[in-house]
Amino acid sequence: MKINAPIYILGKLVNGEVTNPDILYSINTHRTDKTSIKVEDLPPYYCEVHNTKQTAYIRTTDLVDVRYVWHFYNPSQLFIGFNGEIQTDDWGFYTNCISIYEKDDIQRILKYIEKYSPQVDLSTVYKEINAEKEKK
């Protein structure tokens, strides 16, 4: 059983509703595939995160770039790049990355990144988090 996708999600979002909530789907680029993998099969470097409807498991090894952007009115976001440095498009949006915005998930995944991707420099991320705390 090959377990190496950057993201696994429980269930598939169809028309705003989660179908098959007990099945893990792998996400690679813009493709979602049903797997036979169980959550308990995932290696320890997959970090559990949440959004409003789904639970995801993010691989925290072999990361290339991590950025934190705080917003005064919107939830702050942690951006994680798996395949090269995070880029911005013509409108200033980050591309080739995923984003995490739940505060507890951000703190949890940063601990995973420290442990499983020590080559990633998180000093700028922590600097932004501390600056956010001072400004609120």
Image (tube, grey):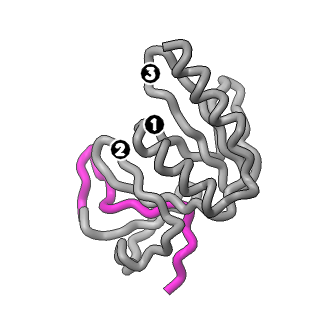
Residue 117 percent coordinates (x, y):
67, 59
Give residue 101's mark.
1
Q: Which numbered disc, 1 or 3, marks the residue that appears first in the sequence?
A: 3
What residue is rendered at 44% in x and 68% in y?
Answer: 33
**Who's the residue at 40% across and 41% down the image?**
104
Q: Where is 124 relative to 131, above or below?
A: below
The residue nearer to you, when weighing 101 against 127, is: 127
Question: Is residue 6 a member of the stretch shown in magenta?
Answer: yes
User: What secondary structure is marked by label 1?
Assistant: loop
Q: Name the residue beneath numbered marker 3.
A: 74
Residue lying at 24% horizontally and 59% vertically, measured from the top left: 19
**Residue shown at 49%/86% (left/top)?**
1
> On the image, numbered disc 2 is attached to which residue?
51
- Graded by Cα atoms within 10 Å as few (under 14), some (14 to 19) or many (20 or more), the crowding at tag 2 reads few
In the image, is residue 14 part of the stretch drawn in magenta? yes
For badge 3, the amino acid type reads Asn
Residue 10 x %, y %: 33, 62
Q: Which amino acid type is shown beneath numbered disc 1?
A: Tyr
Image vertical order of residue 102 relative to residue 4, above or below: above
Using residue 121 as the reference point, say whether residue 1 is left or right of it: left
Q: Earlier in the sequence, mark 2 or mark 1?
A: 2
Query: Is disc 1 surrounded by few (<14), some (14 to 19) or many (20+) residues within 10 Å?
Result: some
In the image, which residues are magenta?
A: 1-20
| Measured Cα–Cα span from mark 1 to mark 3 | 9 Å
Label the magenta part by its dominant secondary structure. strand
